[in-house]
Amino acid sequence: MKGVWDMQVGRRQFLKWSAAAMAVSLYGPPVQAGERNGMPYRKLGDTGEEVSILCVGGAHIGGGGLSDDESVRMMRTAVDEGVNFFDNAWAYHGGRSEERMGMALKDGYRDQVFLMTKSTKRTEEGARQDLEDSLRRLDVDVIDLWQLHEMVDEDDPRRCYEDGPLDVAIKAREEGKIRYIGFTGHYQPSTHVEMIERGFEWDTLQMPLSVMDHHYRSFEQTVLPMAAERNIGVIAMKTMGGNPNSITSTGDVSPAECLRYAMNLPVASVCSGMDSMEVLRENLATAKAFEPMTEDEVGDVLARSAPHSQEGELEVYKTVWHS
């Protein structure tokens, strides 16, 4: 089947993919804003902040496959190696992810980290409680970036704007409990478009960007140009798809290629779930060695990913989770 696909693709389709991806890259990738310990940094939109191009994903760091000590050791190793961006969410593992991250930020590590967490609540009371819980679990006075999480249902943008969550975020920023405000989503690009077009000046947004997303219900081709035009800080996620299967399981695209493709886009940072010290070190090496991709490299990896990406079969967050 794959051989038939390859013959059908041909040079014309290869060049089409190359041109499409390189057109997006006219907005970037962002100019490197220095580095620390070999880790490249980029500007986070209009915030003035500089963040590492690799971000530690909060969901995996709180998983049952790691002990508290192992998780803390991984996070501190990441910081020591130059990573300064930590992702999290109120809901991850019943709060365990935030609690572990709070442990890791002791002993001077808090001052070295740009800390982000999120809330899925769609009411004023629920969002406020999530924020207070997150501050307590993380054991910090200020969260650098608080994001309204999982814009997946059609009504989510309206509820965030009209039912209180955005008001909570704005008030919390005024009170000094958070510094910046963003949103996330992984299902339908149209929800991101509506979140932007309703008019609030978002500091950041987080969305799936991958070699698969390019082919199906694409955030890269729909939302990314809008964010770039407005200089919203973009955080890439789900670079390998997964849950349960990822593009890397096919053998056609490697984990390093997935990360590099996302880092080649006009994003500030790429959030990666890392559940072992081995995976962390592999991702650190990929980030530190990052070089922009050539047109041929982009076309090649898109051609290899295309047979697995036509209906979102490896992006279940766009299909199964919400079907």
Image (tube, rainbow, N blue to C red):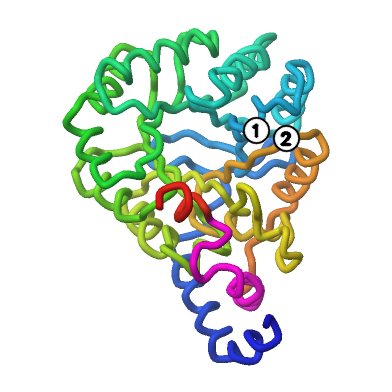
Residue 106: which quarter of the image?
top right
Residue 48 % position (x, y) = 43, 35
Q: Residue at x 52, y 53 (%)?
A: 316
- Could you tell whether 97 is left or right of 132 in the image? right
Q: Are marks 1 and 2 in contact (CB under 8 Å)?
A: yes
* Residue 314, magenta (yes or no): yes
Residue 60, disc:
1
* Amino acid type for the residue under numbered disc 1: His
Q: Residue at x 58, y 64 (%)?
A: 211
Q: Does the magenta stretch mainly form a helix, a strand or a loop? A: helix
Mark 1 and mark 2: Cα distance apart in space: 5 Å
Which residue is at the front of the view, 233 or 308? Answer: 308
Q: Residue at x 32, y 49 (%)?
A: 192
* Amino acid type for the residue under numbered disc 2: Asp
Residue 275, disc:
2
The span shown in magenta is 296-315
Residue 91 % position (x, y) = 49, 25
